[in-house]
Amino acid sequence: MSNQLLIIRGGPASGKTTWLEQNHLLKRTISPDNIRRELYNGELGDPKVVWRFVELQFESAAFDGLFFVLDAQDSDYDKWLRKARRYGYEVWFKVMSTPRSECFKRNAARDGAARLDDVVMMMAFDWLEQHPIPEGSNILPDDADPIKFFKLEE
């Protein structure tokens, strides 16, 4: 089934990337973090450039009707819902419900640039609280196998 967008949502160190790896979805994922790594060697760089790359990747995938995942924790959900509708996409959310305390513990165990400052972690969790998933959105069940659920080929 194409014309599906899955937005993965969760705080830093909540297991988003691990879930994507375990479910064979990394190659179908659009991520500003990955773009930052490639363009700016992991530094913040110019956010406008990063988000323009995300939008171009989205438009390219959507033009072809491809299934894809958006891994952008601090994105404007309403904007993505409007874009998805424009291309006839159905939007789903995968919610990582890892407790905040566990995320902080995981983050503390990270090395180098992967480890975030506690202030940045708090800002990310505050953002999530202030930007709930839009009412009436489709939520991927926790026990769903996304490959089967979205009828994808590995």
Image: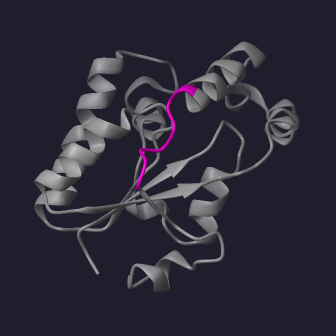
Instruction: Give the image location of residue 15, x and y in percent.
Output: 69, 51
Residue 54 makes an appearance in the image: no
Residue 28 shown left or right of residue 94 in the figure:
left
Residue drawn at x 47%, y 18% as measured from the top left: 44
118 or 81, nearer to the observer: 81
The quarter of the rendered structure image containing the N terminus is bottom left
Q: Main secondary structure of the magenta part?
A: loop
150 or 114, nearer to the observer: 150
Instruction: Give the image location of residue 94, x and y in percent.
Output: 54, 58
Residue 5 shown left or right of residue 100 in the figure:
left
The quarter of the rendered structure image containing the C terminus is bottom left
Q: Is residue 132 magenta?
A: yes
Q: Which residues are magenta?
A: 130-136
How is the structure coloured here? one colour
4 or 111, nearer to the observer: 4
In terms of image quadrants, where is residue 119? top right
Residue drawn at x 41%, y 55% as measured from the top left: 136
In terms of image quadrants, where is residue 150? bottom left
Instruction: Give the image location of residue 17, x and y in percent.
Output: 61, 53
